[in-house]
């Protein structure tokens, strides 16, 4: 719950008097991540955490995958020694992976569909790319901050150009607990910019989530708030992609149901020792993580540079 408590410190850091003027409103994603890091440090200092800055890791790489994909912020709370099963029921986790986005107008028409694709990309990263060893102890958070009201400022929008509705956007912006039945990625095929940061192969994927949203806006300035701050905690999720499904259950267990060929191969280790079965299960999870990561950020062919021949000839007189 420390992450949620830190979130409620964010307005003080962004607009409070007495803080060094950072001009967060004119910044970008890194500015919001920096402000949130300070909010987390405030909470850690309030608990007399030893060397609290060592609990934070900016731009932490998702391990065991080849593309260089990184979480915006990682917070390790294992040294607080406050965790318990009952506390975990309220959402406390030792390893907290945080992705963040900050949307604002910078001149011209905002890239609405591209912004929506960025949101989906971060959600999928949090669902899939968290390493297997963290599955039972991982908190997955998406911090999305908007300059003003996100819908009135047209930073994102609920309705598609064909008149259909993105119900998941409404649920991601509203405070409270929500069940998102599907991100309906197949309905975005008409807008290639949606998949610019995601990969067009995801247009056939399905994804459902259960989330808890914390939302902060100035209560008496709802027409034009300086910020709309939302912290989304992923409680459970299921992604089906390329014939494989990955399910994050609310009890923190993770189930990967591979394609038929992999199931047949897994049957051969069913009677194997526990260590072999666990290794096979870990391989299935990591193979799925790598497949998703490679789709999000495919390899770019390296350009071979022509070697310059050494010129040992005598200079022309």
Image (cartoon, rainbow, N blue to C red):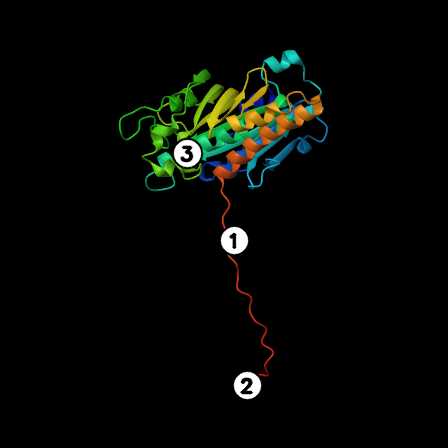
Asked whether residue 133 is in view, the answer is yes
Asked whether residue 17 is in view, the answer is no
Q: CA distance from mark 2 to mark 3?
A: 60 Å
| Label annotation for residue 117 | 3
* 1 vs 3, front mark: 1
Q: Nearer the viewer, residue 134 or 109?
A: 134
Q: Earlier in the sequence, mark 1 or mark 3?
A: 3
Q: Nearer the viewer, residue 315 or 102?
A: 315
Work out which quarter of the rendered image holds the N terminus and state it: top right
The percent position of residue 8, horizontal first and vertical second, equals 53, 22
Q: Is residue 44 above or below residue 28?
A: above
Determine whether, in the image, residue 49 is placed left or right of residue 224: right
Reading the image, the residue beneath label 1 is 302
Q: How many marks?
A: 3
Reading the image, the residue beneath label 2 is 316
| Label annotation for residue 149 | none
The percent position of residue 30, horizontal first and vertical second, equals 52, 38
Q: Are marks 1 and 3 in contact (CB under 8 Å)?
A: no
């Amino acid at each position: 719950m420390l992450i949620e408590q830190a979130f409620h410190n964010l307005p003080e850091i962004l607009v409070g008097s007495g803080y060094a003027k950072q001009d967060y409103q004119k910044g970008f994603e890194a500015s919001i991540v920096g402000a949130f890091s300070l909010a987390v440090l405030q909470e850690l200092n309030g608990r007399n955490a030893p060397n609290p800055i060592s609990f934070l890791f900016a731009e932490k790489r998702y391990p065991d995958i080849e593309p260089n994909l990184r979480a915006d912020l990682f917070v390790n709370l294992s040294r607080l020694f406050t965790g318990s099963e009952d506390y975990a029921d309220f959402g406390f986790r030792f390893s907290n992976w945080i992705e963040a986005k900050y949307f604002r107008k910078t001149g011209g028409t905002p890239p609405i569909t591209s912004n929506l694709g960025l949101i989906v990309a971060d959600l999928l990263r949090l669902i899939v790319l968290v390493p297997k060893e963290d599955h039972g102890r991982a908190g997955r958070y998406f911090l999305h901050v908007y300059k003003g009201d996100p819908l009135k400022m047209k930073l994102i929008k609920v309705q598609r150009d064909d008149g259909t509705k993105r119900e998941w956007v409404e649920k991601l912006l509203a405070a409270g607990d929500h069940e998102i039945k599907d991100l309906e990625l197949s309905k975005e095929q008409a807008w290639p910019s949606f998949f610019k940061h995601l990969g067009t192969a995801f247009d056939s994927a399905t994804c459902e989530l259960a989330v808890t949203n914390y939302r902060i806006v100035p209560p008496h300035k709802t027409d034009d708030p300086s910020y709309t701050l939302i912290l989304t905690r992923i409680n459970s999720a299921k992604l089906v992609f390329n014939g494989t499904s990955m399910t994050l259950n609310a009890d923190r267990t993770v189930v990967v149901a591979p394609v038929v060929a992999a199931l047949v191969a897994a049957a051969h280790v069913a009677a194997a020792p526990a260590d072999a079965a666990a290794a096979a299960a870990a391989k299935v999870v990591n193979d799925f993580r790598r497949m998703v990561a490679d789709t999000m950020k495919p390899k770019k062919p390296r350009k071979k540079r022509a070697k310059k021949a050494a010129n040992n000839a005598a200079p022309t007189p």
